[in-house]
Amino acid sequence: MVRDIAPLLDNKWYDPAVVVVDSNLNFAIPLLGGHHGANEIARKISELGAVPVLTTATEVHGKPSVEGIADRLGCEIFNKESTVAVNCALLETEIEVLNVKGPRIVVVDEDVSVLIRKQHKNVEIKDNNKGKQ
């Protein structure tokens, strides 16, 4: 399976989550994208009786990940390259999430993950037939 999908893979931030399930539905193993949805898919599959085999370090140790925190807060990770260092630090200690309201200028080191709130756009739906008979 790995060889089959290898040519389709490009970047861990954009590749799809892939979960492998054995034919007897004993195990659900996130193969790709553990922090990007595969762990959650494996947990959902566990409702069918499979044991989720989670191997991401933060999951194994019951710690949060930058990706999980960003998802829960409805944010995107601005500086994705920072997540390795921050996730490693999260294994050792709790890290405070700071909420900075602007306008501000923020200077951070490369081992600081910057989360940006996702922009939600309001869509107005008009009924062009309203009032017509």
Image (cartoon, grey):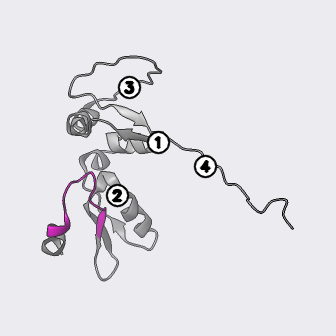
User: How many angstroms separate mark 3 from mark 1 (CA)?
Assistant: 17 Å
- Say the numbered circle drawn on residue 39: 2
For mark 1, give the secondary structure: loop
Work out whether mark 3 precedes mark 1 in sequence or the reverse, and give the earlier one: 1
The residue carrying pointer 3 sits among few (fewer than 14), some (14 to 19) or many (20 or more) residues within 10 Å by Cα, namely few
Work out whether mark 3 precedes mark 2 in sequence or the reverse, and give the earlier one: 2
Residue 13: within the magenta? yes
User: How many angstroms separate mark 1 from mark 2 (CA)?
Assistant: 18 Å
User: How many angstroms separate mark 4 from mark 1 (CA)?
Assistant: 19 Å
Residue with the mark numbered 1: 74
| Circles 4, 3 touching at the beta carbon (< 8 Å) | no
Task: Residue type at mark 3: give it.
Answer: Glu
The residue carrying pointer 2 sits among few (fewer than 14), some (14 to 19) or many (20 or more) residues within 10 Å by Cα, namely many
Which span of residues is magenta-colored?
Answer: 7-19
- Say the numbered circle drawn on residue 123: 4
Where residue 22 sits, quadrant-wise, is bottom left
- Say the numbered circle drawn on residue 100: none
Residue with the mark numbered 3: 96
Work out whether mark 4 precedes mark 1 in sequence or the reverse, and give the earlier one: 1
User: How many angstroms separate mark 2 from mark 4 (CA)?
Assistant: 32 Å
Q: Residue at x 35, y 78 (%)?
A: 25
Task: Residue type at mark 1: give it.
Answer: Gly
The residue carrying pointer 1 sits among few (fewer than 14), some (14 to 19) or many (20 or more) residues within 10 Å by Cα, namely few
Q: Is residue 92 above or below residue 30?
A: above
Query: Between tags 3 and 1, which lies in front?
Result: 1
User: How many angstroms separate mark 3 from mark 2 (CA)?
Assistant: 24 Å
Work out whether mark 1 precedes mark 2 in sequence or the reverse, and give the earlier one: 2
